[in-house]
Image (spheres, rainbow, N blue to C red):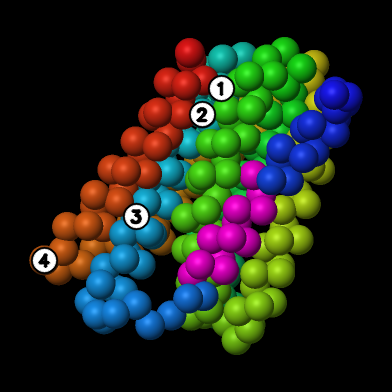
Amino acid sequence: MVELSVWLQIALLTLGAGITMSVGAALAGIERIRPGWLEDEFRHAVIAFGGGALLAAVALVLVPEGIRSLSSSAVFGWFAAGGVAFMLLDRWLAAHGTSASQLTAMLSDFVPEALALGATFTVSRESGLLLAGIIALQNLPEGFNAYRELALSTRYRGSRVVLAFALTALLGPVAGLTGHFLLAGYDDVIASIMLFAAGGILYIIFQDIAPQVRLQNHWAPPLGAVAGFLLGVMGKLALGA
């Protein structure tokens, strides 16, 4: 069996991890879950699951990897800059009547992790494979939530949103190959990108995602957040193993 070149493996892994965004979007387009209360609670639970997965990405991947090679002042600066930048973006989107917080969070999570995958794949192929699997699992509920958000705040047809998400998956190979060919020797640059993204994602979680989760007298949504974070914990343990 012919071994695929490293760059082709990175491209295929990051593309596959990104495609799950469109899979999640396609699942979100399925309507009329009955009874009605189950449909409502299910959607809130998926939003919470995505929020938990994002929080896990921040706590277990982006921040731990980001602080390894940077000084305390650089960590503070990049993390704070990410939070402020995403606040300004959020205000701009609100001023223009568009809500895309879920989409922004999804891409802010996907691109830095794909960069890291490309930069580290040659050092540890096993870790690269596991990281690709974690990214794919995170992108599934995030694609679901981003589709629902865009469906409510825009007039785009569902098929166009799913297609757009599929095309967005191409950012994965671009980021992965950039990390492999250009940033593999620049740990500080990758760390700065990760911390910037982490600050922005944390802002989005508490500004836009968490407030959408709660339902009166329903307990599945918060359990969804626990499950999403647990997914990240198990992935981190697998990477450590």
Q: CA distance from mark 3 to mark 1?
A: 24 Å
Q: Can see residue 71?
A: no
- Quarter residue 187 falls in: top right
Q: CA distance from mark 4 to mark 3?
A: 16 Å
Residue identifier under label 2: 61
Q: Tell me the residue at 65%/73% (across/down).
A: 161
Task: Check contact, mark 4 vs mark 3: CB within 8 A.
Answer: no
Q: Is residue 187 above or below residue 174?
A: above
Q: Tell me the residue at 69%/45% (across/down).
A: 16
Q: CA distance from mark 2 to mark 4?
A: 33 Å
Q: Earlier in the sequence, mark 2 or mark 3?
A: 3
Relative to 184, 160 lies left or right = left
Give amino acid for label 2: Val
Estimate how packed mark 1 is, as few (under 14), some (14 to 19) or many (20 or more) residues with alpha carbons within 10 Å.
Answer: some
Give amino acid for label 4: Asn
Task: Check contact, mark 2 vs mark 1: CB within 8 A.
Answer: yes
Estimate how packed mark 2 is, as few (under 14), some (14 to 19) or many (20 or more) residues with alpha carbons within 10 Å.
Answer: many
Q: CA distance from mark 2 to mark 3?
A: 19 Å
Q: Which mark is residue 48?
A: 3
